[in-house]
């Protein structure tokens, strides 16, 4: 299952979920993240947290969602937005017919710097719980409507 995680800047929340899904997925899923207006870099606190949690960060980078719209792009099964700005806006047409869901949460980078450690950890914990809940399901065998309902339920937790 190919999962594309979207956020405007692709520097924190989408990066966190990409790393979590790829590590927890055990090869069942391939996750990428991208942004509508990528910052071009990963927030240093996000990298620090992922490294503390023993995630491989060597392949992570901030990138545009345009990379996933061309003829050589992977066929996407799921698109998960993690910020309201992208969820409420127009998105490109993705190869395939991906199921879309919104797992919104506040951007911890918007917090004062002295709250980053706790804010980033809280965002990570929410995304980790949601990824775990998704991976408990036989997502490969769900029809699109069941997958959409599952994603929507998880996004409300």
Image: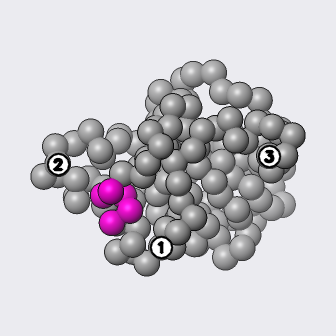
Q: Give the residue at x 57% y 22%.
A: 89
Residue 110 vs 3, above or below: the answer is: above
Tell me which corner region of the image, top left, top right, bottom left or bottom right, holds residue 94. Answer: top right
**Sequence-earlier tag: 2 or 3:** 3
Mark 2 burial class by Cα count in 10 Å: few <14, some 14-19, many 20+: few
Mark 3 burial class by Cα count in 10 Å: few <14, some 14-19, many 20+: few
Q: Does the magenta stretch include residue 96?
A: no
Foreground of the two, 131 or 4: 4
Q: How is the image coloured?
A: one colour
Q: Label 3 belongs to which residue?
A: 73
Numbered circle sitting on residue 113: 2
- Left/right of residue 104 with respect to residue 98 in the rendered view: left
Numbered circle sitting on residue 55: 1
Q: Give the residue at x 53% y 60%.
A: 60
Q: Can residue 153 be seen in this view?
A: no
The image shows residue 110 at horizontal and vertical percentages of: 27, 39
Q: Distance between the residues labelled 2 and 1?
A: 23 Å
- Please tell me whether mark 2 sits on a helix, a strand or a loop: helix
Mark 1 burial class by Cα count in 10 Å: few <14, some 14-19, many 20+: some
């Amino acid at each position: 299952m190919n999962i594309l995680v979207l956020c405007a800047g692709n520097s924190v929340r989408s990066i966190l979920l990409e790393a979590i899904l790829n590590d927890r997925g055990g090869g069942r899923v391939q996750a990428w993240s991208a942004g509508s207006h990528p910052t071009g870099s990963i927030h240093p606190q996000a990298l620090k947290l992922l490294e503390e949690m023993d995630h491989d960060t060597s392949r992570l980078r901030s990138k545009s969602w345009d990379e996933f719209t061309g003829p050589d792009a992977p066929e996407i099964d799921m698109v998960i937005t993690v910020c309201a700005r992208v969820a409420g806006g127009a998105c490109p047409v993705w190869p395939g017919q991906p199921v879309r869901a919104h797992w919104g949460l506040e951007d911890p980078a918007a917090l004062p710097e002295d709250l980053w450690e706790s804010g980033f950890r809280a965002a990570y914990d929410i995304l980790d719980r949601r990824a775990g809940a998704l991976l408990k399901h036989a997502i490969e065998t769900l029809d699109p409507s069941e997958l959409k309902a599952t994603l929507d339920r998880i996004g409300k937790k």
